[in-house]
Image (tube, rainbow, N blue to C red):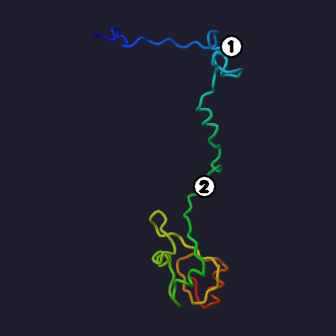
Amino acid sequence: MQLHQLKPFHKSKKRKRIGRGGKRGTYSGRGAKGQRSRAGARIRPALRDFIKKIPKKRGIGFKKLREKIEIVNIEDLNKKFKEGEKITSELLLEKKMVKRIKGKIPLVKILGKGNPTKKLLIEGCGVSKGAKDKIEKAGGSVQ
């Protein structure tokens, strides 16, 4: 058997010729007016739409891949830590005040909500200006 001797197993089905009168009424299933109802309707390629959606410059819709920062307030530190205890992001993780982000110890920032009643020694954490002032007034230090 050779290639030119092969024949399809099923008969080929005739294409439905729409819009030529018959039992489907005046519009014959094509709706009324518009590009799709015409013979030889040309619908623009999907690729062009895709290309138009891509921004020309990198600034549109671009999010910087910044690490998320966990926030802790002074009032929370007052409750969990003792007088003169060093506070680091690892200790905050142990005391379950912050959670791991994608398996890593997160960046921590301390904000100034509440008033410190203890000396707090903070290392390796971000501290807001207001929080720093409050901690230093209470006799603590920020490094």
Q: Which image quadrant for residue 109?
A: bottom right
Cα distance in 3D space between marks 1 and 2: 53 Å
The mark found on residue 83 in the picture is: none
Residue 24, percent from left and from top: 63, 14
**Where's residue 98, x and y in %?**
51, 72
User: Tag on residue 26?
Assistant: 1
Residue 40 x, y percent position in the rendering: 63, 16
Residue plotted at (56% across, 70% down): 70
Query: Residue 117 falls in which quadrant of the image?
Result: bottom right
Q: Nearer the viewer, residue 8 or 44?
A: 8
Residue kind at label 1, given as amino acid type: Thr
Residue at the outermost left position: 1
Q: Residues within 10 Å of mark 1 (few under 14, many from 20)?
A: few
Q: Residue at x 62, y 90 (%)?
A: 138
Q: Secondary structure at mark 2?
A: loop
Q: In the image, which disc is placed on residue 63?
A: 2
Q: Amino acid under label 2?
A: Lys
